[in-house]
Image (spheres, rainbow, N blue to C red):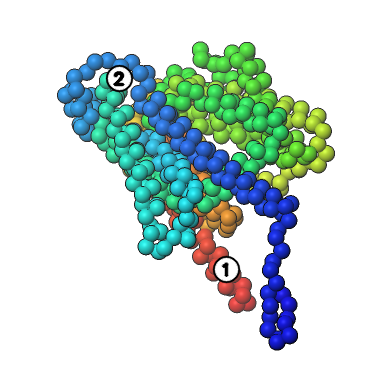
Protein backbone atom coordinates (compact mmCIF):
# COMPACT_ATOMS: atom_id res chain seq x y z
CA UNK A 1 0.00 0.00 0.00
CA UNK A 2 1.33 3.48 -0.94
CA UNK A 3 0.22 7.01 -0.17
CA UNK A 4 -0.28 9.44 -3.11
CA UNK A 5 0.46 13.12 -3.18
CA UNK A 6 -3.19 13.92 -2.50
CA UNK A 7 -2.99 11.91 0.72
CA UNK A 8 -5.27 9.12 -0.44
CA UNK A 9 -4.23 5.53 -0.11
CA UNK A 10 -3.39 3.74 -3.33
CA UNK A 11 -3.38 -0.08 -3.24
CA UNK A 12 -0.63 -1.62 -5.29
CA UNK A 13 -1.47 -4.79 -7.17
CA UNK A 14 -0.64 -7.90 -5.18
CA UNK A 15 2.25 -10.05 -6.26
CA UNK A 16 1.40 -13.31 -7.96
CA UNK A 17 2.10 -16.36 -5.85
CA UNK A 18 5.38 -18.07 -6.53
CA UNK A 19 5.30 -21.41 -8.38
CA UNK A 20 6.46 -23.22 -5.23
CA UNK A 21 3.68 -21.69 -3.12
CA UNK A 22 1.11 -22.52 -5.78
CA UNK A 23 2.27 -26.13 -5.91
CA UNK A 24 2.14 -26.33 -2.10
CA UNK A 25 -1.43 -25.00 -1.98
CA UNK A 26 -2.58 -27.31 -4.77
CA UNK A 27 -0.77 -30.21 -3.12
CA UNK A 28 -2.57 -29.68 0.19
CA UNK A 29 -5.90 -29.38 -1.63
CA UNK A 30 -5.14 -32.55 -3.56
CA UNK A 31 -4.27 -34.39 -0.37
CA UNK A 32 -7.53 -33.26 1.25
CA UNK A 33 -9.46 -34.35 -1.82
CA UNK A 34 -7.73 -37.73 -1.85
CA UNK A 35 -8.46 -38.16 1.87
CA UNK A 36 -12.13 -37.26 1.34
CA UNK A 37 -12.33 -39.80 -1.49
CA UNK A 38 -10.73 -42.43 0.75
CA UNK A 39 -13.26 -41.67 3.50
CA UNK A 40 -16.12 -42.11 1.02
CA UNK A 41 -14.70 -45.44 -0.09
CA UNK A 42 -14.19 -46.54 3.53
CA UNK A 43 -17.79 -45.71 4.50
CA UNK A 44 -19.19 -47.38 1.37
CA UNK A 45 -17.04 -50.47 1.93
CA UNK A 46 -18.17 -50.74 5.56
CA UNK A 47 -21.82 -50.40 4.51
CA UNK A 48 -21.41 -53.07 1.81
CA UNK A 49 -19.66 -55.39 4.28
CA UNK A 50 -22.49 -55.13 6.82
CA UNK A 51 -25.09 -55.62 4.08
CA UNK A 52 -23.27 -58.79 2.97
CA UNK A 53 -23.13 -59.96 6.59
CA UNK A 54 -26.86 -59.34 7.02
CA UNK A 55 -27.60 -61.38 3.89
CA UNK A 56 -25.28 -64.17 4.99
CA UNK A 57 -26.55 -64.26 8.56
CA UNK A 58 -30.20 -64.17 7.51
CA UNK A 59 -30.16 -66.75 4.68
CA UNK A 60 -27.51 -69.18 5.95
CA UNK A 61 -27.21 -72.16 5.17
CA UNK A 62 -28.66 -71.15 1.74
CA UNK A 63 -30.44 -74.48 1.21
CA UNK A 64 -33.34 -73.06 -0.77
CA UNK A 65 -36.35 -75.26 -1.46
CA UNK A 66 -39.64 -74.84 -3.30
CA UNK A 67 -42.46 -73.23 -1.30
CA UNK A 68 -45.77 -71.94 -2.69
CA UNK A 69 -45.84 -68.17 -2.83
CA UNK A 70 -49.10 -68.07 -0.89
CA UNK A 71 -47.58 -70.07 1.97
CA UNK A 72 -44.42 -67.92 1.90
CA UNK A 73 -46.50 -64.74 2.05
CA UNK A 74 -48.52 -66.13 4.94
CA UNK A 75 -45.36 -66.84 6.91
CA UNK A 76 -43.97 -63.43 6.07
CA UNK A 77 -47.04 -61.48 7.22
CA UNK A 78 -47.56 -63.51 10.40
CA UNK A 79 -46.42 -61.94 13.68
CA UNK A 80 -44.13 -64.87 14.38
CA UNK A 81 -43.55 -68.38 13.02
CA UNK A 82 -46.30 -70.86 13.71
CA UNK A 83 -43.94 -73.17 15.63
CA UNK A 84 -42.31 -70.45 17.74
CA UNK A 85 -45.15 -70.16 20.22
CA UNK A 86 -44.31 -66.66 21.42
CA UNK A 87 -42.60 -63.46 20.41
CA UNK A 88 -38.82 -63.50 20.84
CA UNK A 89 -37.58 -60.17 22.19
CA UNK A 90 -33.96 -61.28 21.85
CA UNK A 91 -34.51 -61.90 18.13
CA UNK A 92 -36.04 -58.45 17.72
CA UNK A 93 -33.07 -56.91 19.52
CA UNK A 94 -30.69 -58.90 17.32
CA UNK A 95 -32.43 -57.56 14.20
CA UNK A 96 -32.16 -53.99 15.49
CA UNK A 97 -28.43 -54.40 16.13
CA UNK A 98 -27.95 -56.15 12.78
CA UNK A 99 -29.16 -53.15 10.77
CA UNK A 100 -27.84 -50.39 13.02
CA UNK A 101 -24.36 -50.32 11.40
CA UNK A 102 -25.97 -50.56 7.96
CA UNK A 103 -27.96 -47.40 8.60
CA UNK A 104 -24.96 -45.65 10.14
CA UNK A 105 -22.44 -46.36 7.36
CA UNK A 106 -24.96 -45.99 4.54
CA UNK A 107 -25.92 -42.53 5.81
CA UNK A 108 -22.23 -41.71 6.20
CA UNK A 109 -21.44 -42.83 2.65
CA UNK A 110 -24.37 -40.88 1.20
CA UNK A 111 -23.43 -37.72 3.09
CA UNK A 112 -19.77 -38.06 2.07
CA UNK A 113 -20.83 -38.46 -1.57
CA UNK A 114 -23.16 -35.45 -1.30
CA UNK A 115 -20.35 -33.26 -0.03
CA UNK A 116 -18.34 -33.93 -3.16
CA UNK A 117 -18.57 -30.86 -5.33
CA UNK A 118 -21.53 -29.38 -3.47
CA UNK A 119 -22.09 -26.50 -1.14
CA UNK A 120 -21.50 -27.37 2.51
CA UNK A 121 -24.63 -27.50 4.65
CA UNK A 122 -23.44 -24.61 6.82
CA UNK A 123 -23.19 -22.39 3.71
CA UNK A 124 -26.65 -23.28 2.39
CA UNK A 125 -29.62 -20.95 2.82
CA UNK A 126 -31.54 -21.60 6.00
CA UNK A 127 -34.56 -22.87 4.06
CA UNK A 128 -32.51 -25.64 2.45
CA UNK A 129 -30.34 -26.78 5.33
CA UNK A 130 -32.75 -29.45 6.50
CA UNK A 131 -33.27 -30.90 3.02
CA UNK A 132 -29.93 -32.74 2.80
CA UNK A 133 -30.22 -34.68 6.07
CA UNK A 134 -33.86 -35.53 5.35
CA UNK A 135 -33.13 -36.86 1.87
CA UNK A 136 -30.21 -38.94 3.16
CA UNK A 137 -32.40 -40.37 5.91
CA UNK A 138 -35.20 -41.14 3.46
CA UNK A 139 -32.89 -42.90 0.99
CA UNK A 140 -31.22 -44.89 3.76
CA UNK A 141 -34.50 -46.07 5.28
CA UNK A 142 -35.90 -46.93 1.85
CA UNK A 143 -32.82 -49.01 1.07
CA UNK A 144 -33.02 -50.71 4.48
CA UNK A 145 -36.72 -51.48 3.96
CA UNK A 146 -36.03 -52.98 0.52
CA UNK A 147 -33.10 -55.05 1.78
CA UNK A 148 -34.90 -56.25 4.90
CA UNK A 149 -38.14 -57.10 3.08
CA UNK A 150 -36.25 -59.04 0.43
CA UNK A 151 -34.10 -61.17 2.70
CA UNK A 152 -36.91 -61.76 5.20
CA UNK A 153 -39.24 -62.95 2.45
CA UNK A 154 -36.50 -65.23 1.06
CA UNK A 155 -36.25 -66.85 4.49
CA UNK A 156 -39.50 -68.64 3.70
CA UNK A 157 -37.60 -70.69 1.12
CA UNK A 158 -34.71 -71.62 3.48
CA UNK A 159 -34.84 -74.50 5.95
CA UNK A 160 -34.98 -73.64 9.66
CA UNK A 161 -35.76 -69.99 8.93
CA UNK A 162 -38.87 -68.13 10.08
CA UNK A 163 -39.71 -64.91 8.17
CA UNK A 164 -41.81 -62.27 9.86
CA UNK A 165 -42.97 -58.76 9.13
CA UNK A 166 -41.98 -57.86 12.71
CA UNK A 167 -38.37 -58.61 11.84
CA UNK A 168 -38.62 -56.12 8.98
CA UNK A 169 -39.96 -53.48 11.34
CA UNK A 170 -37.16 -54.17 13.83
CA UNK A 171 -34.50 -54.00 11.13
CA UNK A 172 -35.80 -50.74 9.70
CA UNK A 173 -35.92 -49.35 13.23
CA UNK A 174 -32.30 -50.46 13.65
CA UNK A 175 -31.35 -48.63 10.45
CA UNK A 176 -33.12 -45.52 11.76
CA UNK A 177 -31.11 -45.81 14.98
CA UNK A 178 -27.98 -46.03 12.86
CA UNK A 179 -28.90 -42.86 10.97
CA UNK A 180 -29.59 -41.07 14.24
CA UNK A 181 -26.25 -42.27 15.62
CA UNK A 182 -24.49 -40.93 12.55
CA UNK A 183 -26.17 -37.55 12.88
CA UNK A 184 -25.03 -37.48 16.50
CA UNK A 185 -21.34 -38.36 15.96
CA UNK A 186 -20.70 -37.61 12.29
CA UNK A 187 -18.11 -34.90 12.90
CA UNK A 188 -16.13 -37.06 15.29
CA UNK A 189 -16.37 -40.11 13.01
CA UNK A 190 -15.11 -38.06 10.07
CA UNK A 191 -12.18 -36.84 12.16
CA UNK A 192 -11.28 -40.34 13.33
CA UNK A 193 -11.60 -41.75 9.82
CA UNK A 194 -9.38 -39.01 8.46
CA UNK A 195 -6.77 -39.64 11.17
CA UNK A 196 -6.86 -43.41 10.63
CA UNK A 197 -6.52 -43.13 6.86
CA UNK A 198 -3.72 -40.58 7.25
CA UNK A 199 -1.92 -42.96 9.60
CA UNK A 200 -2.28 -45.84 7.15
CA UNK A 201 -1.12 -43.64 4.29
CA UNK A 202 2.03 -42.67 6.18
CA UNK A 203 2.77 -46.23 7.32
CA UNK A 204 5.55 -48.28 5.82
CA UNK A 205 4.87 -51.39 3.77
CA UNK A 206 5.75 -53.59 6.75
CA UNK A 207 3.32 -51.73 9.01
CA UNK A 208 0.51 -52.08 6.48
CA UNK A 209 1.17 -55.82 6.26
CA UNK A 210 1.03 -56.05 10.05
CA UNK A 211 -2.29 -54.17 10.14
CA UNK A 212 -3.69 -56.51 7.48
CA UNK A 213 -2.56 -59.49 9.57
CA UNK A 214 -4.34 -58.03 12.62
CA UNK A 215 -7.57 -57.65 10.63
CA UNK A 216 -7.28 -61.22 9.31
CA UNK A 217 -6.67 -62.53 12.85
CA UNK A 218 -9.80 -60.78 14.17
CA UNK A 219 -11.94 -62.12 11.32
CA UNK A 220 -10.61 -65.67 11.83
CA UNK A 221 -11.22 -65.39 15.59
CA UNK A 222 -14.91 -64.60 15.00
CA UNK A 223 -15.72 -66.98 12.14
CA UNK A 224 -18.40 -68.13 11.37
CA UNK A 225 -19.72 -65.00 13.14
CA UNK A 226 -23.18 -66.42 13.91
CA UNK A 227 -23.74 -64.13 16.89
CA UNK A 228 -26.68 -64.85 19.16
CA UNK A 229 -28.30 -62.99 22.02
CA UNK A 230 -30.40 -65.93 23.14
CA UNK A 231 -29.38 -67.00 26.65
CA UNK A 232 -30.51 -70.55 25.87
CA UNK A 233 -28.02 -70.88 23.01
CA UNK A 234 -25.16 -69.47 25.08
CA UNK A 235 -26.21 -71.87 27.84
CA UNK A 236 -26.13 -74.67 25.27
CA UNK A 237 -22.48 -73.82 24.60
CA UNK A 238 -21.70 -74.20 28.28
CA UNK A 239 -23.80 -77.36 28.61
CA UNK A 240 -21.97 -79.08 25.72
CA UNK A 241 -18.54 -77.91 26.94
CA UNK A 242 -17.91 -75.39 24.18
CA UNK A 243 -17.51 -72.49 26.62
CA UNK A 244 -14.35 -73.41 28.48
CA UNK A 245 -12.07 -71.96 31.09
CA UNK A 246 -8.32 -72.44 30.47
CA UNK A 247 -7.16 -76.07 30.50
CA UNK A 248 -10.69 -77.43 30.90
CA UNK A 249 -11.00 -80.92 29.34
CA UNK A 250 -13.54 -81.19 26.54
CA UNK A 251 -13.95 -83.09 23.25
CA UNK A 252 -13.96 -79.69 21.52
CA UNK A 253 -10.91 -78.34 23.37
CA UNK A 254 -8.10 -76.89 21.28
CA UNK A 255 -5.32 -79.30 20.36
CA UNK A 256 -1.62 -78.52 21.04
CA UNK A 257 -1.00 -78.01 17.33
CA UNK A 258 -3.87 -75.53 17.11
CA UNK A 259 -2.54 -73.69 20.17
CA UNK A 260 0.88 -73.38 18.53
CA UNK A 261 -0.75 -72.10 15.35
CA UNK A 262 -2.74 -69.49 17.32
CA UNK A 263 0.40 -68.34 19.14
CA UNK A 264 2.27 -67.95 15.84
CA UNK A 265 -0.67 -66.09 14.27
CA UNK A 266 -0.78 -63.66 17.22
CA UNK A 267 2.85 -62.58 16.81
CA UNK A 268 1.94 -59.85 14.25
CA UNK A 269 -0.45 -58.35 16.83
CA UNK A 270 2.44 -57.70 19.20
CA UNK A 271 4.60 -56.34 16.38
CA UNK A 272 1.81 -54.01 15.22
CA UNK A 273 1.14 -52.77 18.76
CA UNK A 274 4.79 -51.70 19.07
CA UNK A 275 5.50 -50.39 15.56
CA UNK A 276 2.27 -49.11 13.96
CA UNK A 277 1.04 -45.55 14.41
CA UNK A 278 4.32 -44.17 15.81
CA UNK A 279 5.99 -42.93 12.65
CA UNK A 280 8.72 -44.63 10.70
CA UNK A 281 11.47 -43.69 13.18
CA UNK A 282 9.96 -44.42 16.58
CA UNK A 283 8.18 -47.24 18.38
CA UNK A 284 6.34 -48.02 21.58
CA UNK A 285 7.91 -49.82 24.50
CA UNK A 286 7.55 -53.59 24.84
CA UNK A 287 5.34 -53.26 27.92
CA UNK A 288 3.02 -50.75 26.30
CA UNK A 289 2.75 -52.79 23.11
CA UNK A 290 2.11 -56.01 25.03
CA UNK A 291 -0.63 -54.35 27.10
CA UNK A 292 -2.31 -52.95 23.98
CA UNK A 293 -2.24 -56.36 22.28
CA UNK A 294 -3.54 -58.06 25.43
CA UNK A 295 -6.44 -55.62 25.68
CA UNK A 296 -7.39 -56.28 22.05
CA UNK A 297 -7.20 -60.06 22.53
CA UNK A 298 -9.36 -59.99 25.66
CA UNK A 299 -11.97 -57.94 23.78
CA UNK A 300 -11.90 -60.46 20.91
CA UNK A 301 -12.35 -63.33 23.37
CA UNK A 302 -15.31 -61.68 25.12
CA UNK A 303 -17.03 -60.99 21.80
CA UNK A 304 -16.47 -64.62 20.79
CA UNK A 305 -18.70 -65.89 23.62
CA UNK A 306 -22.04 -65.15 21.83
CA UNK A 307 -20.84 -66.84 18.60
CA UNK A 308 -22.90 -70.00 18.79
CA UNK A 309 -20.95 -72.26 16.42
CA UNK A 310 -17.56 -71.31 17.82
CA UNK A 311 -15.94 -73.06 20.79
CA UNK A 312 -14.68 -70.40 23.19
CA UNK A 313 -11.63 -71.88 24.89
CA UNK A 314 -9.70 -69.79 27.41
CA UNK A 315 -6.56 -71.77 26.58
CA UNK A 316 -6.63 -70.21 23.10
CA UNK A 317 -6.55 -66.77 24.71
CA UNK A 318 -3.48 -67.70 26.76
CA UNK A 319 -1.71 -68.99 23.64
CA UNK A 320 -2.57 -65.79 21.75
CA UNK A 321 -1.33 -63.65 24.65
CA UNK A 322 1.95 -65.55 24.63
CA UNK A 323 2.39 -65.06 20.89
CA UNK A 324 1.51 -61.35 21.04
CA UNK A 325 3.95 -60.79 23.92
CA UNK A 326 6.68 -62.55 21.94
CA UNK A 327 5.89 -60.29 18.98
CA UNK A 328 6.14 -57.18 21.15
CA UNK A 329 9.54 -58.34 22.41
CA UNK A 330 10.72 -59.13 18.87
CA UNK A 331 9.84 -55.59 17.76
CA UNK A 332 12.72 -54.24 19.84
CA UNK A 333 15.08 -55.37 17.06
CA UNK A 334 13.68 -52.64 14.83
CA UNK A 335 16.12 -49.78 14.36
CA UNK A 336 13.96 -47.06 15.90
CA UNK A 337 15.60 -45.01 18.59
CA UNK A 338 12.80 -42.91 20.18
CA UNK A 339 10.75 -45.21 22.41
CA UNK A 340 7.25 -44.18 23.57
CA UNK A 341 6.79 -45.41 27.12
CA UNK A 342 3.71 -46.16 29.14
CA UNK A 343 0.94 -43.58 29.34
CA UNK A 344 0.51 -43.56 33.11
CA UNK A 345 -2.64 -41.46 32.92
CA UNK A 346 -4.29 -44.01 30.63
CA UNK A 347 -2.99 -46.80 32.83
CA UNK A 348 -4.53 -45.22 35.92
CA UNK A 349 -7.81 -44.78 34.07
CA UNK A 350 -7.75 -48.43 33.01
CA UNK A 351 -7.02 -49.48 36.58
CA UNK A 352 -9.98 -47.45 37.82
CA UNK A 353 -12.21 -49.06 35.17
CA UNK A 354 -11.08 -52.57 36.12
CA UNK A 355 -11.57 -51.80 39.81
CA UNK A 356 -15.05 -50.44 39.14
CA UNK A 357 -16.01 -53.53 37.14
CA UNK A 358 -14.67 -55.74 39.94
CA UNK A 359 -16.69 -53.85 42.55
CA UNK A 360 -19.79 -54.14 40.36
CA UNK A 361 -19.34 -57.90 40.07
CA UNK A 362 -18.75 -58.07 43.82
CA UNK A 363 -22.11 -56.44 44.53
CA UNK A 364 -23.92 -58.39 41.82
CA UNK A 365 -22.67 -61.89 42.69
CA UNK A 366 -22.27 -61.68 46.47
CA UNK A 367 -22.04 -64.09 48.37
CA UNK A 368 -20.70 -66.06 45.35
CA UNK A 369 -22.78 -69.20 45.77
CA UNK A 370 -21.82 -70.51 42.33
CA UNK A 371 -22.67 -73.96 41.07
CA UNK A 372 -21.05 -75.48 37.98
CA UNK A 373 -23.93 -77.87 37.34
CA UNK A 374 -24.23 -77.68 33.55
CA UNK A 375 -27.80 -79.10 33.27
CA UNK A 376 -29.08 -76.64 35.88
CA UNK A 377 -27.35 -73.73 34.16
CA UNK A 378 -28.83 -74.80 30.83
CA UNK A 379 -32.35 -74.94 32.29
CA UNK A 380 -31.90 -71.52 33.91
CA UNK A 381 -30.70 -70.10 30.59
CA UNK A 382 -33.75 -71.62 28.86
CA UNK A 383 -36.03 -69.97 31.43
CA UNK A 384 -34.28 -66.64 30.90
CA UNK A 385 -34.58 -66.99 27.13
CA UNK A 386 -38.35 -67.48 27.38
CA UNK A 387 -38.75 -64.32 29.51
CA UNK A 388 -35.68 -62.12 28.92
CA UNK A 389 -37.24 -58.98 30.46
CA UNK A 390 -38.79 -60.60 33.53
CA UNK A 391 -38.75 -58.79 36.87
CA UNK A 392 -35.68 -59.36 39.07
CA UNK A 393 -35.92 -61.50 42.18
CA UNK A 394 -35.63 -58.48 44.50
CA UNK A 395 -34.74 -54.80 44.54
CA UNK A 396 -31.36 -55.65 46.06
CA UNK A 397 -30.43 -57.38 42.78
CA UNK A 398 -30.70 -54.08 40.91
CA UNK A 399 -30.35 -51.13 43.29
CA UNK A 400 -26.61 -51.45 44.18
CA UNK A 401 -25.63 -51.80 40.55
CA UNK A 402 -27.80 -48.87 39.50
CA UNK A 403 -26.29 -46.62 42.17
CA UNK A 404 -22.76 -47.62 41.15
CA UNK A 405 -23.63 -47.00 37.50
CA UNK A 406 -24.87 -43.48 38.26
CA UNK A 407 -21.74 -42.70 40.29
CA UNK A 408 -19.57 -44.07 37.47
CA UNK A 409 -21.36 -41.81 34.97
CA UNK A 410 -20.69 -38.72 37.11
CA UNK A 411 -17.04 -39.77 37.51
CA UNK A 412 -16.41 -40.60 33.84
CA UNK A 413 -18.11 -37.64 32.14
CA UNK A 414 -15.53 -34.93 33.01
CA UNK A 415 -12.69 -37.23 31.92
CA UNK A 416 -13.89 -37.60 28.34
CA UNK A 417 -12.07 -35.85 25.52
CA UNK A 418 -13.99 -32.64 24.70
CA UNK A 419 -13.32 -33.19 20.99
CA UNK A 420 -14.71 -36.76 21.05
CA UNK A 421 -17.21 -36.52 23.89
CA UNK A 422 -20.21 -37.79 21.92
CA UNK A 423 -18.44 -40.79 20.42
CA UNK A 424 -16.80 -41.65 23.71
CA UNK A 425 -20.14 -41.38 25.50
CA UNK A 426 -21.65 -43.91 23.09
CA UNK A 427 -18.66 -46.22 23.59
CA UNK A 428 -18.95 -45.94 27.37
CA UNK A 429 -22.65 -46.82 27.23
CA UNK A 430 -21.99 -49.74 24.88
CA UNK A 431 -19.14 -51.16 26.97
CA UNK A 432 -21.17 -50.72 30.14
CA UNK A 433 -24.07 -52.57 28.54
CA UNK A 434 -21.73 -55.47 27.74
CA UNK A 435 -20.46 -55.51 31.34
CA UNK A 436 -24.00 -55.46 32.73
CA UNK A 437 -25.04 -58.28 30.38
CA UNK A 438 -22.04 -60.37 31.47
CA UNK A 439 -22.96 -59.69 35.08
CA UNK A 440 -26.50 -60.92 34.47
CA UNK A 441 -25.16 -63.94 32.59
CA UNK A 442 -23.11 -64.87 35.62
CA UNK A 443 -26.33 -65.14 37.64
CA UNK A 444 -27.13 -68.27 35.63
CA UNK A 445 -24.50 -70.06 37.73
CA UNK A 446 -25.63 -68.55 41.04
CA UNK A 447 -27.84 -70.51 43.39
CA UNK A 448 -31.18 -68.73 43.34
CA UNK A 449 -30.01 -66.37 40.60
CA UNK A 450 -32.64 -64.79 38.37
CA UNK A 451 -30.98 -63.07 35.43
CA UNK A 452 -33.01 -60.52 33.50
CA UNK A 453 -32.39 -57.88 30.87
CA UNK A 454 -34.63 -55.55 32.85
CA UNK A 455 -31.74 -55.12 35.27
CA UNK A 456 -29.44 -54.20 32.37
CA UNK A 457 -31.88 -51.51 31.18
CA UNK A 458 -32.19 -50.03 34.68
CA UNK A 459 -28.42 -49.84 35.14
CA UNK A 460 -27.88 -48.35 31.70
CA UNK A 461 -30.50 -45.72 32.48
CA UNK A 462 -28.71 -44.90 35.72
CA UNK A 463 -25.39 -44.63 33.87
CA UNK A 464 -26.87 -42.29 31.25
CA UNK A 465 -28.39 -40.19 34.04
CA UNK A 466 -24.95 -39.94 35.68
CA UNK A 467 -23.34 -38.96 32.39
CA UNK A 468 -25.97 -36.26 31.85
CA UNK A 469 -25.59 -34.66 35.29
CA UNK A 470 -21.79 -34.90 35.24
CA UNK A 471 -21.29 -31.46 33.60
CA UNK A 472 -23.80 -29.93 36.04
CA UNK A 473 -21.89 -31.32 39.01
CA UNK A 474 -18.61 -29.97 37.64
CA UNK A 475 -20.14 -26.54 37.05
CA UNK A 476 -21.48 -26.40 40.60
CA UNK A 477 -18.11 -27.40 41.97
CA UNK A 478 -16.36 -24.64 40.00
CA UNK A 479 -18.89 -22.07 41.20
CA UNK A 480 -18.27 -23.08 44.81
CA UNK A 481 -14.53 -22.75 44.33
CA UNK A 482 -14.93 -19.30 42.79
CA UNK A 483 -17.19 -18.24 45.66
CA UNK A 484 -14.47 -19.12 48.17
Q: How many marks?
A: 2
Tell which circle, 1 or 2, labels the residue nearer the N-terminal end.
2
Q: Mark 2 falls on what kind of element?
A: loop
Considering depth in this image, is 448 or 450 the residue closer to the camera? Answer: 450
> How far apart, in angstroms, are the residues tagged by discs 1 and 2?
61 Å
The residue at the far left in this view is 70
Considering depth in this image, is 421 or 308 the residue closer to the camera? Answer: 421
| Callout in the foreground (1, 2) | 2
Q: Which residue is found at the position 27% from the left and 20% from the top?
A: 157
The quarter in which the C terminus is drawn is bottom right
Relative to 8, residue 140 above or below: above
Residue 432 rendering spot, x and y as whole percentages: 49, 44
| Image quadrant in which you'd find residue 478 | bottom right
Assess whether mark 2 and mark 1 are in contact (beta carbons under 8 angstroms): no
Q: Left of 440 or right of it: where is 335? A: right
Q: How crowded is mark 1: few (under 14 residues within 10 Å), some or many (20 or more)?
A: few
* Residue 234 in view of the camera: no
Q: Mark 1 falls on what kind of element?
A: helix
Residue 325 rendering spot, x and y as whole percentages: 71, 29
Considering depth in this image, is 340 or 53 the residue closer to the camera? Answer: 53
Query: Pointer 2: what residue?
Result: 158
Q: How crowded is mark 2: few (under 14 residues within 10 Å), some or many (20 or more)?
A: many
Q: Which residue is found at the position 74% from the left and 51% from the top?
A: 20
Residue 455 rendering spot, x and y as whole percentages: 40, 44
Q: Left of 61 or right of it: where is 401? A: right
Query: Pointer 1: what residue?
Result: 477
Q: Which residue is found at the position 30% from the left and 17% from the top?
A: 64
| Image quadrant in which you'd find residue 279 | top right
The residue at the far bottom in this view is 6
Relative to 253, residue 117 above or below: below
Relative to 147, residue 36 above or below: below
* Residue 128 in view of the camera: yes
Amino acid sequence: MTRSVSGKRDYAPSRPASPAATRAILGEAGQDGACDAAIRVAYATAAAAFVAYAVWGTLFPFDFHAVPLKAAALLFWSRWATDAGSLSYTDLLSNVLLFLPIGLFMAAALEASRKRGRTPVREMPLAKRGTAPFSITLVTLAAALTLSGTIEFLQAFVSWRTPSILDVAAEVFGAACGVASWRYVRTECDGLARAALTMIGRSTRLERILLACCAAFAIAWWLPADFTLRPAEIGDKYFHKRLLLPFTPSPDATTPFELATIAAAAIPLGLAAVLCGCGSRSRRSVVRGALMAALALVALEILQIPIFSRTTDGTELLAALGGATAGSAAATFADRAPVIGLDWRALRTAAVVVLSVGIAFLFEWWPFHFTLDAPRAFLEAMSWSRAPFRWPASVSDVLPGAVLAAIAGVFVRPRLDPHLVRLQTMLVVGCAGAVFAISEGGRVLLVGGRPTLMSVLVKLSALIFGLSIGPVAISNRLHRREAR
